[in-house]
Amino acid sequence: MKLVIANKNYSSWSLRPWLLMTEFGLDFELREESLAGDDLKQRLLQYSPSCKVPVLIDGDLTVWDSLAICEYLSEQYLGGEGWPGAVGSRAHARAICAEMHSGFMALRSQMPMNIRARRKIAASNAVLADIRRIDEIWSECRRTYNADGDWLFGKFSIADCMYAPVALRFMTYGASLSDPGQQYMAAILDNPGVKSWIKAASKETEIIPEDEAGDELK
């Protein structure tokens, strides 16, 4: 299998399937494409008609979109273990993943993932509402499933992959969270795969000006 991703410092969508594959020990080749340059669309077109990353190439099959990749990996290689085992928990996990996948637009635009940085923004009401909602999701999951482990649904799942980049955003911009939210964020940041990704991102030198939001903290 080959996973095509972009810059680790900025590409939140790339982190999601990479983290799932890394956490479950899947064997794959990693191909990184720079997001810079006028030839970006042409370079990405060789992998996917969407001209976006991440892209999973497995033999003759190409899967694009981070959630679709995670779904495929869970079915094809993980025996469904990418999701919680119980029907109700699985439905809950899919619901919050879909909410992450299609929502939180204010947070995405005003708090872009920028792992290397520590920055301050003037958070809009819409951003604050997104942060509160994410904190609610994390807190509810931890209250419900904390007896089964440290992750959103006890055991590590696709849901954790979908929300890991949010924890990195909160780290960058110093978001204020409840105690359960802070505890879950700490678990994400202590994950070996996430630590490895952060370490690699810190060594990158590519700068995407539009993702350098806010003011640098001194």
Image (tube, rainbow, N blue to C red):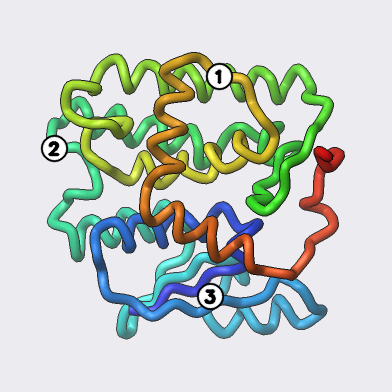
Quarter of the image that includes the C terminus = top right
- Asked which secondary structure carries label 3, the reply is loop
Mark 1 or mark 3: name the one nearer the start of the chain: 3
Q: What residue type is disc 1 on? A: Leu
Q: CA distance from mark 1 to mark 2?
A: 29 Å
> Does 4 appear above or below 131?
below
Mark 1 and 3 residues: CB-CB less than 8 Å, in contact? no
Q: What residue type is disc 3 on? A: Ser
Mark 2 or mark 3: name the one nearer the start of the chain: 3
Kindly identify the residue that appears in the image at 53 percent across and 60 percent down.
Answer: 199
> Does 215 appear above or below 57?
above
Kindly identify the residue that appears in the image at 63 percent across and 61 percent down.
Answer: 202
Kindly identify the residue that appears in the image at 17 percent across and 51 percent down.
Answer: 80
User: Considering depth in this image, is 205 or 24 the residue closer to the camera?
Assistant: 205
Which residue is denoted by mark 3 in the rendering? 48
Label ID, residue 25:
none
Q: Looking at the rendering, which quadrant does residue 205 occupy? A: bottom right
Which residue is denoted by mark 1 in the rendering? 177
Return the x and y of residue 212 as percentages of the image width and height. 80, 50
Query: Tag count in the figure?
Result: 3
Return the x and y of residue 204 as percentages of the image width and height. 66, 68
Quarter of the image that includes the N terminus = bottom left
Which residue is denoted by mark 2 in the rendering? 85
Front label number (2 vs 3) = 2
Q: What residue type is disc 2 on? A: Gly
Mark 1 and 2 residues: CB-CB less than 8 Å, in contact? no
Mark 2 and 3 residues: CB-CB less than 8 Å, in contact? no
Q: Looking at the rendering, which quadrant does residue 89 occupy? A: top left
- Asked which secondary structure carries label 1, the reply is loop
User: Considering depth in this image, is 134 or 178 the residue closer to the camera?
Assistant: 178
Q: Looking at the rendering, which quadrant does residue 42 occupy? A: bottom right
